[in-house]
Image: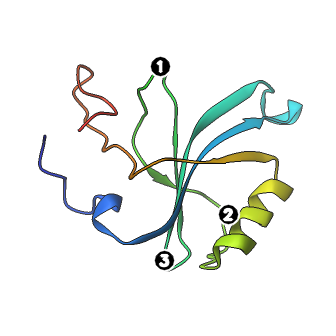
Amino acid sequence: MSTPPPGDPLNEPYAAHWLFGADMPDELGGGFVAGQLLLRTDGTLLRRYSSGGPDYGPWDTVPGWTPQPNVERAAAALHYNGYDLHPAGGPPPRYDPDPRKAGHD
């Protein structure tokens, strides 16, 4: 296990963790994306995309998201915006920039 970098989002408390799938609009290139969403207790939403298999890229703040600390309201807003959400079991795995360990503790 590696030491989390400063500012690692997983060092902050979170309210919800979801797996997601979403169809991208044609004006954004179309296609299907999948990944994880992490809703912090302050309402900040973080997202990372699947890079195939069990691996994920780094966490990024979702641009344009209005902080929503209420889990049910946040989920409703995400559904409205085309996200298909599924509860994730357990805490999200940490990102490790070493590709041999990406997505694993």
Task: State the SS at label 3.
Answer: loop
Q: Would you name the residue on which mark 1 appears?
A: 53
Residue at (27, 63) in percent of width and height: 7
Residue at (30, 44) in percent of width and height: 94
Tag count in the figure? 3
Marks 3/1: CA–CA distance: 29 Å
Residue at (87, 30) in percent of width and height: 26
Dot 2 alpha-carbon crowd within 10 angstroms: few under 14, some 14 to 19, many 20 or more = few
User: Residue 97 at x, y = what percent?
Assistant: 25, 33
On screen, residue 11 above or below 68: above
Q: Residue 35: which quarter of the image?
A: top right
User: Residue 4 at x, y = what percent?
Assistant: 18, 52
On screen, residue 13 above or below 88: below
Q: Would you name the residue on which mark 2 appears?
A: 64
Q: Residue 2: which quarter of the image?
A: top left
On screen, residue 24 above or below 74: above
Sequence-wise first label, 1 or 2: 1
Q: Is residue 46 left or right of residue 101?
A: right
Marks 3/2: CA–CA distance: 18 Å
Marks 1/2: CA–CA distance: 28 Å
Q: Residue 14: which quarter of the image?
A: bottom left
Task: State the SS at label 2.
Answer: loop
Sequence-wise first label, 3 or 1: 3
Q: Would you name the residue on which mark 3 appears?
A: 41
Give the residue type at disc 1.
Gly
